[in-house]
Amino acid sequence: MFVNIIESYRRVIAIADEGLIGKQFFEGKKQLDVKENFYKGENEAPLSKEEVIKIIKIHSKEDSTFNIVGEKSVACAIEAGAITENEVLKIDGIPYTLILL
């Protein structure tokens, strides 16, 4: 999974499954665009499940927004306690969630 931490007026944590980077998904009028520059950023190597969960837990305690795409990435957010399965949406079968803390 790739994690990109974007510093803005509030921190944005973008997390996506490695295999989804650069792809677009459509369902009716909905579109999910997993842009490399947003989700991967300057990172060269993906992170492990443990590393992603740790990042989610750390930033869940702060004023952060999460944008999470993909089965593995969403599962990490659930395991970290940041969301429940009821908060997961799908576009073209791809799970995603937005969290505003």
Image (cartoon, rainbow, N blue to C red):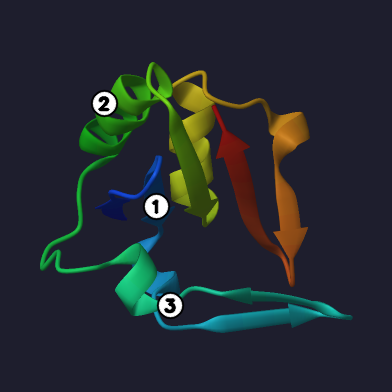
Disc 3 from disc 2: Cα separation: 23 Å
Q: Position of residue 34 (x, y in %)?
A: 48, 73
Q: Earlier in the sequence, mark 2 or mark 1?
A: 1
Residue position marked by numbered label 1 in the rendering: 15
Q: Quadrant of the N terminus?
A: bottom left
- Residue located 54% across and 27% down the image: 101
| Residue 50 higher or lower than 94, as above or below | above
User: Which element carries disc 3, helix, strand or loop?
Assistant: loop
User: Which element carries disc 2, helix, strand or loop?
Assistant: helix
* Crowding at mark 3 (Cα within 10 Å: few <14, some 14-19, many 20+): some
| Residue 29 higher or lower than 72, as above or below | below
Q: Position of residue 81 (x, y in %)?
A: 51, 18
Disc 3 from disc 1: Cα separation: 11 Å
Q: Earlier in the sequence, mark 3 or mark 2?
A: 3
- Residue located 61% across and 45% down the image: 98
Near-viewer residue (91 or 61): 61
Residue position marked by numbered label 3 in the rendering: 35
Identity of the residue furthest to the right in this view:
28
Residues marked 2 and 1 touching at CB (< 8 Å): no
Q: Position of residue 74 (x, y in %)?
A: 53, 43
User: Which element carries disc 1, helix, strand or loop?
Assistant: strand
Residue position marked by numbered label 2 in the rendering: 54
Q: Tell me which amino acid carries mark 1.
A: Ile
Disc 2 from disc 1: Cα separation: 13 Å
Identity of the residue furthest to the left in this view:
44
- Residue located 47% across and 24% down the image: 79
Quadrant hosting residue 20: bottom left
| Residue 7 higher or lower than 69, as above or below | above
